[in-house]
Image (cartoon, rainbow, N blue to C red):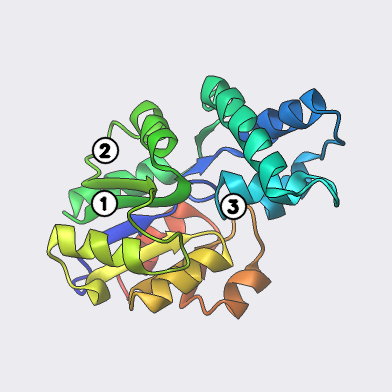
Amino acid sequence: MKNYQAVIFDLDGTLVNSLADIADSMNNTLLRFGYPIFNYGAYKYFIGNGLKKLVFRCLPEGEKTEENVARCLLAMMKEYGKHYVDKTQLYNGIAELLDFLVSNKLKLAVLSNKADEITKKICTKLLSNWPFDIILGATEKFPRKPAPDSALYIARQLKILPEKFLYLGDTSVDMQTANAAKMYSIGVTWGFRNRLELEEAGAKLIIDNPLELINTLLYI
């Protein structure tokens, strides 16, 4: 662990289980416009590239025009803005992992493809017990993950070399981001995707429980 000074966490599917609130909000939006809805399992594969991409994936073929996506996205954002922490909660073991990292003086950051405003709101509600140095969601300032720009920005802001970062995420997007930024990519299986996706995306380590990382950090 002496080699690492900071940790970047993805938000959805890594720190917090937000699937139900996202799915409920999207389904309510789809119902409003007369479109079919999806079960929670389907949303595990719709989430991960931001709400605009989510909306695009959920709309029926023939309804994915730019104008219609924009209309449904606006409605979805309004709906989600009212219900973003109705069911969302930290995954089991996350609090203990954060306590351990803080006690060992590692810097903490959140990097999400979710809109920056709602990312910060969720972190304020659920993660205010820990001293996160940077919380960054999607903005026009950077291309979305898997582009490494936002991860490298965090490294510059914290004045820590990228290779001194651990990067935890639950999707191939996160592993690609971490590897492109030359950070140590750690895939987590308690989120929205499976181990195979993480392996194929080049995860350097895969863990099944947040507490597993505490023991692993003694050896990497």
Mark closer to the chain start, 3 or 1: 1
| Camera-side residue of 81 and 160 | 81
Determine the residue positioned at 58% across, 71% down.
198
How many other residues sit within 10 Å of disc 2, few (<14), some (14-19) or many (≥20)?
A: some
| Camera-side residue of 49 and 207 | 49
Tags 3 and 1 touching, CB below 8 Å? no
Residue 112 x/y as whole percent? 43, 50
Tags 2 and 1 touching, CB below 8 Å? yes
Residue 3 x/y as whole percent? 21, 74
How many other residues sit within 10 Å of disc 3, few (<14), some (14-19) or many (≥20)?
A: many
Above/below status of 142 relative to 203: above
Mark closer to the chain start, 2 or 1: 1
| Camera-side residue of 43 and 198 | 43
**Which amino acid is tagged 3?**
Gly
Distance from Cα at disc 2 to Cα at disc 1: 9 Å
Question: Is residue 91 shown to the viewer in this render?
Answer: no
Report the residue marked by disc 3: 191
Residue that sits furthest to the front in the current view:
67
Report the residue marked by disc 2: 130
Distance from Cα at disc 3 to Cα at disc 1: 19 Å
**Which amino acid is tagged 2?**
Trp
Above/below status of 140 relative to 159: above
Determine the residue positioned at 30% across, 59% down.
7
Q: Where is residue 38, by image quadrant?
A: top right
Mark closer to the chain start, 2 or 3: 2
Distance from Cα at disc 2 to Cα at disc 3: 21 Å
Residue 212 x/y as whole percent? 45, 60
Residue 186 x/y as whole percent? 45, 68
Please indicate whether residue 98 sits to the left or right of residue 90 in the image.
left
| Label disc, if present, on residue 108 of the rendered structure | 1
Please indicate whether residue 3 sits to the left or right of residue 79 in the image.
left
